[in-house]
Image (spheres, rainbow, N blue to C red):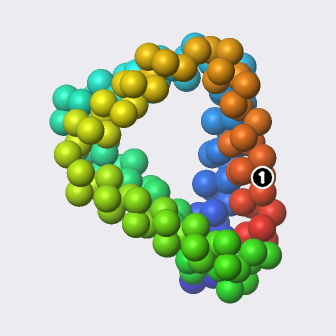
Amino acid sequence: MQILALVVLSAAGAWLVAVAFLMAFRPRYCLHLLSRMSTNLEAGNWRLNLTEQGLRLLAGAALIVRAPDSKLPATFEVAGWLVVATSILIIAAPIRWHGAYGSWWSRHLTPLAIRFLSPFPAVGGAGLIYAAL
């Protein structure tokens, strides 16, 4: 189970690093994707919502499972439960709220802001992988 959790967390960390590169080099495309995703959620696309939250639940569960063997056991445990809890809340909330939240951000973020924010998921993803090892 520990190996599976490590694989899931490594994939999540790599995904965050890839998103960071996309944010740094294609910020307008990132805003386009956010806008499309938000529009789909506002239209009531349950498949998209459940896929997104299912992957978050998987990552949260992997944080909890991996916590004892990680470099930051307490942080992994707390973060894992927070990710699981917030994912369940998002699934339970009206789907249009989730979409409206994304739409608000897609209207207010600029390409420059996206570029400025890009180091954060890169550091978070790399840190996740390092701490999970």
Taking 130 as reference, is 50 left or right? Answer: left
Horizontal and vertical percent position of residue 64: 56, 77
Q: Where is residue 52 in the image (x, y as percent from the top left)?
A: 39, 48
| Residue at (46% x, 57% y) in the render | 56
- Identify the residue shown where x is 24% and y is 51%: 93
Left of 66 or right of it: where is 92? left
Tell me the amino acid under the disc marked 1: Ala
SS state under label 1: helix
Up-down: is 97 above or below 84? above
Residue closer to the observer: 104 or 123: 104
Q: Which residue is drawn at 78% across and 57% down?
A: 127
Q: Name the residue under label 1.
A: 126
Considering the image in quadrants, where does the N terminus appear? bottom right
| Percent coordinates x, y for residue 70 in the rendering | 74, 77
Q: Which residue lies furthest to the bottom in this view?
A: 68
98 is higher (above) or lower (below) than 103: below
Please identify the quarter of the rendering in which residue 131 is found. bottom right
Horizontal and vertical percent position of residue 55 = 44, 56
How many badges with numbers are in the image? 1
Label 1 packing within 10 angstroms: few (<14), some (14-19), many (20+): some
| Quadrant of residue 4 within the rendered picture | bottom right
